[in-house]
Image (cartoon, helix red, strand yellow):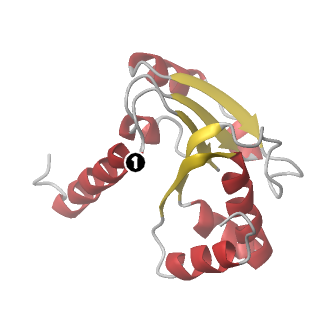
Amino acid sequence: LDWVNPKYWQLQASTAKLVSACIGRGSTVLEVDAVDGAKNLYYLPMGCTITQWLNPQEAAKDIGPTKMAASKNGQGLETVNARDNGRKAPRLQPESFDACLMFGALARAAPRGPDAVFETCDAALRALKPDGRLVFVERTDDAELLLATALDDSDLV
């Protein structure tokens, strides 16, 4: 199918390469503001345990197909719900994840203001183990600025 839309498939291949280089088999992974159901599970190696941080709209959906996809991939799946109608991060155990994945989470937080971007990054960083990795894939021109601003303000970096 790469002849149908070669740029799309090149993006998928580079995303898979990035994620697989950063996240090892058996890792505990937090997917921040997960909105794509099972799609991003396919980037992760087998044996991972994934916790999807869901906003209210995603939490209302049937998670059965996502759990089935995780099972087929040899992965565990849990969910946590954002608080305050999606405006606040879920309560997460500090230093409990090997990796945090952010697929478009900064771009979705940005319309709520710089504090929302900071709070999203801060929650992810606090949830990481001391040697954990923050992996983000953003489709916005200002992603670098958003991330730099959030990280500059963090006492965790």
Looking at the rendered structure, the number of numbered marks drawn on it comes to 1
x and y, in percent, of residue 61 in the image: 67, 34
Seen in the picture, residue 135 relative to 138 is either above or below; the reply is above
Left or right? Give the position of 4 relative to 8: left
Res. 35 visible in picture: no
Q: Residue at x 83, y 42 (%)?
A: 91
What amino acid is labelled 1 in the image?
A: Cys
Seen in the picture, residue 134 relative to 65 is either above or below; the reply is below
User: Circle 1 — which element?
Assistant: helix
Q: Quadrant of residue 64?
A: top right
Seen in the picture, residue 53 relative to 62 is either above or below; the reply is below
x and y, in percent, of residue 52 in the image: 63, 38
x and y, in percent, of residue 138 in the image: 48, 66
Q: Residue furthest left?
A: 3
Q: Residue at x 47, y 22 (%)?
A: 75
Q: Residue at x 40, y 48 (%)?
A: 22
Res. 138 visible in picture: yes
Residue linked to disc 1:
22
> Looking at the rendering, in which quadrant would you find the C terminus?
bottom right
Q: Quadrant of residue 112?
A: bottom right
Left or right? Give the position of 143 relative to 51: left
Q: Residues within 10 Å of mark 1 (few under 14, many from 20)?
A: some
Left or right? Give the position of 77 relative to 25: right
x and y, in percent, of residue 60 in the image: 73, 35
Q: Residue furthest right?
A: 84
Q: Nearer the viewer, residue 59 or 127?
A: 127
